[in-house]
Image (cartoon, rainbow, N blue to C red):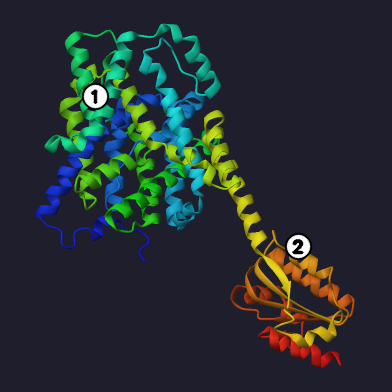
Amino acid sequence: MNLFHPKLLDSFKGYNGALFSKDVLAGITVGVVALPLAMAFAIASGLKPEAGIFTAIIAGGLISVLGGSRVQIGGPAGAFIVIVYGIVDHYGIANLLLATAMSGVFLFLMGLFRLGTLIRFIPVAVIIGFTNGIAVLIGLSQVKEFFGLQITKMPAEFFQAVQTLYAAADTVNPIALMLSVGSLTLLITWRAFQKRLGYLSHIPGTVIAMAAATIVTSALSLPVDTIGSRFGGIPSGLPSFEWIPISWSTAQFVIVPAITLALLGAIESLLCARIADGLIHDRHESNQELMAQGIANLVTPFFGGMPATGTIARTVTNIQSGASTPVAGIAHSATLLVIVLFGAPLAKNIPLASLAAILMFVAWNMGEWRKFADLKQFRLPYRLTMLSVFFLTIILDLTVAIQVGLLLAFITFVYRISSLSRYESASAVDFPELQQYQGSISAFRIYGAIFFGAVKILENIENELPSKVLVLDLKNVIYIDVSGMDALLELEEACKARGIRLLICGLLHQPHEMAVRAGLFERLSKDNIYPDLKQGIASAISQSH
């Protein structure tokens, strides 16, 4: 397997003009979809709108050229809004750029050391919990623009944000509210009737809503905040390369946010790639995808960009528009570049209320609310994990939420596996000859895994030791860890101290390897090791006479 092998290199086998035209048209469609979202995500993150657009162009292009998925579209994502806003609020924009570049290094190393498959071990309950939590926070962050409230700066913390919104409740701008409600209504209506619109169904509702709100605002000169009034519009050209000042002290300062960005980026992009695989019946290369994400996040901050990852909505749009190779992703970046170079002045009149409505719509669609409605059908640990991650994401932050979620999932897993591990006495039906040796010979079958969470099995057996011979059948043991092997060696010592002969039967695969490494065979003679329980019991009986 090649260490670095982008999917683009494998995409041109059998490639032709028809596929190229499909890819280009899909790329143009996604580029148009990405424009309002990229600006909205940047503004909601506390950055200028061009930060989102430049990220979509540069990172989107790099992820398509270097990535491990045929159709994944990279760029700024809604999941990052809460974290990026928090980093800007606490550390400043300069440190956000440094944290993004550092997260790129972490992502690249994760891919290089083949850690992509480990992301799949994050439980669904944790992913749903933080996705829904982020959706709530995105919705909350847009209340200010949605209602046109007069607030100088929104705090990053949940309770302070709610308090600030409540204090400014009497400053509602009715015109901004009408614009946002109108945009949201148009989005919902367009989604409901999109399949019946014929050729118009290819035009995304976000673009329609943004264009309609911009035309109305311009034509009527409405007194609402626009990109022009707030940010002075967007520049009609790409940014120049600017070196980020890096020092060890500042790197240490932002290492935790950088790790958070890397983990979230990895989870989001690989989750998105798995969804794409299901839609195009392909299989992505997770480690290559992480390396591509890493390079994109390392490069983008030097051009004033924000964190980027795989984006589910744009990737699905790309697939539905007929894309089959990374060429579509490259076309999406080129489309955004053309829009910036030739259409930047038109962005001045885009009302922020309309972008807030678009983000509220995105937040609602990214959340898996049905899982909350169906909570009763899940076991208590699953519910507890999901709800803990959800509320901690909202109230504290995503890092704490994921840590607690993984801890709860780990405890649940250990409990479940330990409860599946058990032991039982050898059946009198299978071995009737044992009945006359009750008290002097005991034979036990052990099932499951003997690990740190299930060593009590061996401790319980130690409390039931016979007077002469103990036979243990480990044929059905699938795994033994260091703690389990230590417990087995302690049992062997207890038997030796009491003059009891210990026979081990059926050691196979990993348990056998573990026994070799732990020196169990050096402590027991060949006469104490048997391939199966039947031979072990026969030996115990013959030597007890």
Work out whether mark 2 precedes mark 1 in sequence or the reverse, and give the earlier one: 1
Mark 1 neighbour class, 10 Å CA radius: few under 14, some 14 to 19, many 20 or more: many
Labels 2, 1: front one: 2
In this rendering, position of residue 530 left or right of residue 496: left
- The percent position of residue 11, horizontal first and vertical second, equals 22, 58
Q: Quadrant of the N terminus?
A: bottom left
Q: Residue at x 85, y 89 (%)?
A: 544
In this rendering, position of residue 375 left or right of residue 31: right
Label 2 sits on residue: 456
The amino acid type of the residue labelled 1 equals Met
- The percent position of residue 454, horizontal first and vertical second, equals 70, 62
- The percent position of residue 274, horizontal first and vertical second, equals 37, 52
Which structural element holds mark 2? helix
Q: Residue at x 82, y 91 (%)?
A: 543
Quadrant assignment, res 497 = bottom right
Q: Residue at x 45, y 58 (%)?
A: 114
